[in-house]
Image (cartoon, grey):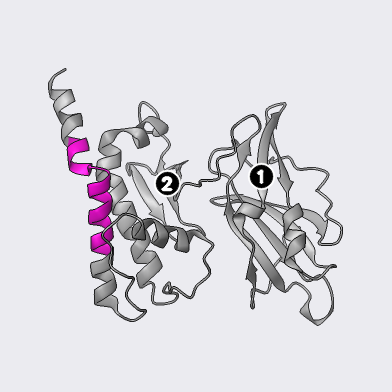
Amino acid sequence: MKRTFNYTQRRVIKRQDISIRLREEAGIWVFDADLQRITSYKFPHNAEVWVEAHRQNLWMQFRWGTISLLRPAADRRLTEFDGAEGILFRVRVVMCQGAEHNKLVAEADGLRYVKTGDVDDLRRPLITPEPDTLDQLLWKLDLESDPPKLLVNRDARPTWKAMTRSPYFIALVYPEVMRQMLTKVLLDPKNEYTDEDEDEGWKADWVKFARNLGGMEPLPHVGDRDDREIWIDSAVAAFSRHHKIRETLELAMNEEDNK
């Protein structure tokens, strides 16, 4: 059963305090979640805990007991998904009774899994390509999803994964992806990012990534649209220098010419 939540004054659960693992059983992916660390957040003891799996328009929800008694869902099979690629998770803590029934107390979103047997790498990618039906489009950004998604044509040859790893795709697509993502984060009139915002989440991840490219000025204040546009231009230029985008494309083209 799908639950709807009141989002007023929610707190953020740090993503490093949650571990999600996937394993395959008889051709179906099953997940396990370690949520024990969230009990130290001093949430109400009777607040309900829910785990959600989602990818594009696919969505599943699992009840996980309460803060005082975490109880994994008995059936954790991801039956709505035809594969593990691109699945993200979120964890929500919700008031279960009284005047604040269904009030969202806290959440962690954009949680990525580790497959059983793989090394648990605490680093997380900013954005992961996902296959989708795009007709003649090779790629597009879905900026309406939370977090946004980089969709690539599932019918691309030789494979959609091979296309995303090609130097042509890297050189021609990723600088534009970065520009659009920073524009979404910093210039969205409905929700412009500020340094006072939470330090967890995909918006903060993109701003931190841009700042760490080197040579970046401090982030302009909210409302300084022109200065923020200049800051985004500088970030894209720094990204291109760091990854030697022009040289990457030229090298690929020279290799093609020499075949």
- Tell me the CA gap for discs 2 and 1: 23 Å
Residue drawn at x 30%, y 58% as measured from the top left: 179
At label 2, which amino acid type do we have? Leu
Magenta stretch? 232-249
User: In the shown orientation, is residue 221 left or right of residue 31?
Assistant: left
Residue drawn at x 35%, y 58% as measured from the top left: 210
User: In the shown orientation, is residue 82 left or right of residue 78?
Assistant: left
What number is the disc on residue 96?
Answer: none
* Tag 1 residue: 20
Circle 2 or circle 1, nearest the eye: 1
Residue 128 screen position, x and y as percent: 45, 45
Q: Is residue 157 visible?
A: yes
* Tag 2 residue: 151
Residue 194 screen position, x and y as percent: 43, 74
Q: Is residue 32 covered in magenta?
A: no
Q: Is residue 247 covered in magenta?
A: yes
Q: Is residue 144 visible?
A: no
Residue drawn at x 68%, y 57% as measured from the top left: 91
Residue 209, quarter of picture: bottom left
Residue drawn at x 14%, y 27% as measured from the top left: 254
